[in-house]
Image (cartoon, coloured by chain):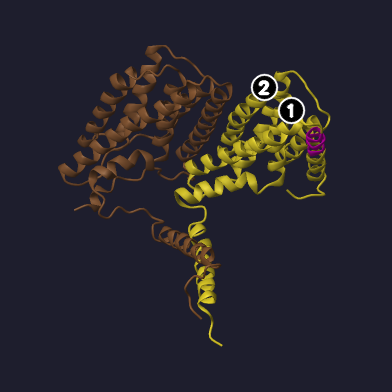
């Protein structure tokens, strides 16, 4: 039985789609686009980073303005400082432990609906941002385009904050408040999992 | 069985057509992974240069954000400082005395501009002029055409100059349109963008310093003007 024109069209579309991954991954981690891709994916491929970044956004939204906006301004700046230390080869003790602790601490802040003074929140977030940045800086692929790697990594981090803020803004509804507090608890539990090695980031 | 769309299957057929067209759109990307500019004229090549060089682009973006952030928009300084100094620096590249600008200098300019935006500073005119002057000279000296006939080089540099000026004014104008609405979230959004630029620049500076230490990891960012490819 001969294939129908419709079947041929479907096969043609499918075979064309097979070409797409080759386009995307043609130059992994090299060149301008490869560097951006690598940097953008870096924060998204570590569950510990994702948990902490989202927690920053949720907590900021929970604390409301100006914390909601101040924390996402502070975090990338301080994180870049930590990243610079990592790039320059400055060693820091307990980086992975502090990253796991950041998920625990920030998750607990959300889960317990903590409302410390703004400067305390800023110092806490800034402290942990150094370790996240250091990890990103030391793990920079040698072949990646440094400029676009930095752009991708900062943008991805910012978008994680924004997604956290979006989640945190649900606190205006009673059911949303429960969801936000539960999210904080889940992030803290994840953090404990990373800390004690039950979960691999 | 006919391949013609039926009354009920017409949208399926159109969907397939769109799908196939989109899939074809993806194909040329493989071929253009390494940018070449065959047939592109020198002026166009110059126009594109600031937008294809990440450090230049980020400086323009930061300066545009800063100018637009301070409403009402004032374009006196860009016209009096940025335009003439960038023209002078571009012209100076034809002497060949300065092969390019070290990346840390370009990144330092971006870092300063990003900090100004993040802190929402209203700089005194002298400081603002100094920032614009540093940016104009750094970008201009770093945008020299590699080779080509005198006409090709002149066309390329003219394209770059036009692109720098128009790009800066456009970014500033559209940012000011948003900033004039006096919404808090717009102001904060601009500051967040400034903090991202600052963070990216700080990392870039570290990369550049590491390269200075001979550890590699930093590739030249410039997309060279392809005047040498143009006959």
Q: Residue A103 location in percent, x, y?
A: 75, 37
Q: Which residues are magenta?
A: A175-183
* Chain that is yellow in the image: A
SS at mark 2 in the image:
loop
Residue nearest the viewer, comparing A89 with A183: A183
Q: Residue B16 location in percent, x, y?
A: 51, 65
Residue B144 image label: none
Chain containing mark 1: A
* Category of crowding for the residue at label 1, using alpha-carbon neighbours closer than 10 angstroms: few (below 14), some (14–19), many (at least 20): many
Residue at x 51%, y 62% (from the top left corner): B15
Q: Residue furthest bottom?
A: A1
Q: Residue A104 location in percent, x, y?
A: 79, 36
What secondary structure predominates along the stretch shown in magenta? helix
Q: Is residue A114 left or right of residue B98?
A: right
Residue B91, by quadrant, is top left
Residue nearest the viewer, comparing B127 with A84: B127
Residue at x 78%, y 45% (from the top left corner): A194
SS at mark 1 in the image:
helix
Q: Residue B106 location in percent, x, y?
A: 40, 32
Mark 1 = which residue? A62
Mark 2 = which residue? A65
């Amino acid at each position: 039985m001969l294939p129908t024109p419709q079947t041929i069209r479907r096969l043609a579309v499918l075979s064309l789609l097979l070409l797409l991954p080759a386009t995307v991954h043609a130059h992994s981690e090299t060149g301008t686009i490869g560097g951006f891709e690598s940097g953008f994916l870096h924060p998204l491929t570590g569950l510990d980073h994702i948990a902490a970044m989202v927690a920053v956004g949720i907590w900021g939204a929970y604390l409301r303005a100006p914390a909601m906006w101040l924390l996402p301004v502070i975090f990338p700046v301080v994180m870049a400082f930590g990243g610079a230390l990592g790039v320059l080869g400055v060693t820091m003790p307990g980086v992975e432990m502090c990253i796991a602790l950041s998920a625990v601490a920030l998750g607990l802040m959300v889960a317990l609906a903590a409302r410390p003074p703004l400067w305390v929140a800023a110092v806490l977030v800034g402290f942990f941002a150094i370790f996240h940045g250091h990890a990103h800086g030391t793990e920079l692929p040698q072949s990646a385009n440094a400029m676009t790697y930095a752009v991708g990594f900062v943008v991805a981090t910012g978008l994680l904050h924004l997604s956290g803020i979006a989640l945190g803004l649900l606190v205006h509804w009673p059911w949303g408040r429960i969801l936000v507090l539960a999210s904080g608890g889940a992030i803290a539990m994840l953090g404990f999992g990373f800390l004690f090695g039950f979960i691999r980031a | 069985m006919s391949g013609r769309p039926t009354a009920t299957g017409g949208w399926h057929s159109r969907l397939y057509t769109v799908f196939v067209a989109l899939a074809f759109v993806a194909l040329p990307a493989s071929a253009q992974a390494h940018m070449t500019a065959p047939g592109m004229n020198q002026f166009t090549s110059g126009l594109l240069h600031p937008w294809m060089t990440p450090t230049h682009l980020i400086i323009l973006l930061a300066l545009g954000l800063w100018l637009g952030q301070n409403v009402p928009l004032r374009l006196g300084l860009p016209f009096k400082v940025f335009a003439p100094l960038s023209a002078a620096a571009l012209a100076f590249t034809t002497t060949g005395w300065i092969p390019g600008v070290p990346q840390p200098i370009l990144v330092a300019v971006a870092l300063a501009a990003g900090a100004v935006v993040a802190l929402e500073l209203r700089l005194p005119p002298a400081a603002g002029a100094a920032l614009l002057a540093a940016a104009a000279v750094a970008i201009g000296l770093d945008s020299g055409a590699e080779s080509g006939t005198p006409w090709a080089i002149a066309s390329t540099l003219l394209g770059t100059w036009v692109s720098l000026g128009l790009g800066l004014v456009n970014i500033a104008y559209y940012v000011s349109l948003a900033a004039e609405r006096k919404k808090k979230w717009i102001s904060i959004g601009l500051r967040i963008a400034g903090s991202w630029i600052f963070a990216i620049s700080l990392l870039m500076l570290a990369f550049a310093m590491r390269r200075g230490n001979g550890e590699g990891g930093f590739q030249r960012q410039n997309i060279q003007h392809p005047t040498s490819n143009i006959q």
